[in-house]
Image (spheres, rainbow, N blue to C red):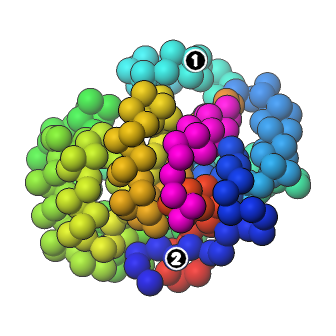
Amino acid sequence: MGAWESAAAPSGPVGDPAPVPSADLHVHASMRAEEAGAVAEALRRLHHQGLQRLWVYAHVVALDAADYQDRLARLPVPALRHYNGPGVDDSVEAATRFLASVSDGPEIDVVPQVDDLHGAVRERLDDVLCAGVVAVKIVHDLDLVDQEQAVLESDHAGLLGRLADDGVPAIVHLDLRRSEAWVRRVLADLPRLRLTIAHLGYSRSRMGPMLDEFQNVVGDIANLALHIEAKPDSYRAFLDRYAGRIVFGSDAFLGNLSAVEGHGRAVAGLGLSDHARNALLHSDWYPEDGR
């Protein structure tokens, strides 16, 4: 088995497209406090429609309000830019408290997310990792993180080395058009690292060779629904070719989970082979340690 294991598809007609996946491994914790009831209900509804597992990314240390608002302003999704100011806390602690209160929902794991590893983040991350996590997300994007490239590359390579040693999978948000050389060096140095490259690295032409060369690497389709729908033929060919190496992710915010179904519909409507469609929509993905 490769870097990730896939459970059997659920019973039912193989060719029956299901817009809700069995697992979404790329959701962000952002929500407003007043949305708690609606979010809990949305999670229950998605669970009843077939969503079994959810990974929710939450900041190790809550971001400064001004910094968070600045980052939201850079997002290509205007509808998500109101998740700032009082009433928004997407830290690990806040996400864990809220999600523990949700009943009759999917199995949910809170995944710590880090970008620059300044003092408070590094110290808190040590505590979070010691408590045990299923994975860690790293934002390696100079457009989103105000940090010198050399410092960011060194810090993130060091963290990935620790995760490889501890057997903890990593999800990295990066642009392969800018950071392919760096991530290749990291993978060459860390053959035990299990790595998901989020958003297919924003470059399928670079992502494909990475998947061919490194069996411990997978990609995800988070925030790519519109691209899939705009270029169905090329995405169909890519997802068919790399069936079993692409993880379902939506890039949804807890406060707006519509992207889960939106990505499900985009995939279901592609006309993928049965194997590729079921691998992406109807499989539950786990690290090799079985968690």
Q: Which residues are magenta?
A: 257-275
Q: Position of residue 134 (x, y in %)?
A: 54, 68
Label of residue 5 in the image: 2
* Residue at the (42%, 21%) spot, across then down: 76
> Looking at numbered disc 1 in the image, what kind of residue is underneath it?
Ala
Residue 249 part of the magenta-drawn span? no
Quarter of the C terminus within the rendering: bottom right
Q: Is residue 203 left or right of residue 151?
A: right
Dot 2 crowding, Cα within 10 Å, few <14, some 14–19, many 20+? some
Q: Position of residue 140 (x, y in %)?
A: 29, 45
Answer whether residue 203 is visible to the viewer in this image.
yes
* Residue at the (56%, 22%) spot, across then down: 80
Label of residue 162 in the image: none
Give how far apart the Cα atoms at labels 2 and 1 are.
35 Å
* Dominant secondary structure (helix, strand or loop) of the stretch shown in magenta: helix
Q: Which residue is mark 1?
A: 79
Asked whether the residues under the numbered discs 2 and 1 touch, taking CB atoms below 8 Å apart as contact, a structural biologist would say no
Total numbered labels? 2
Dot 1 crowding, Cα within 10 Å, few <14, some 14–19, many 20+? few
Vertical placement of 91 versus 96: above or below?
above
Label 1, secondary structure: give it: helix
Q: Is residue 105 left or right of residue 259?
A: right
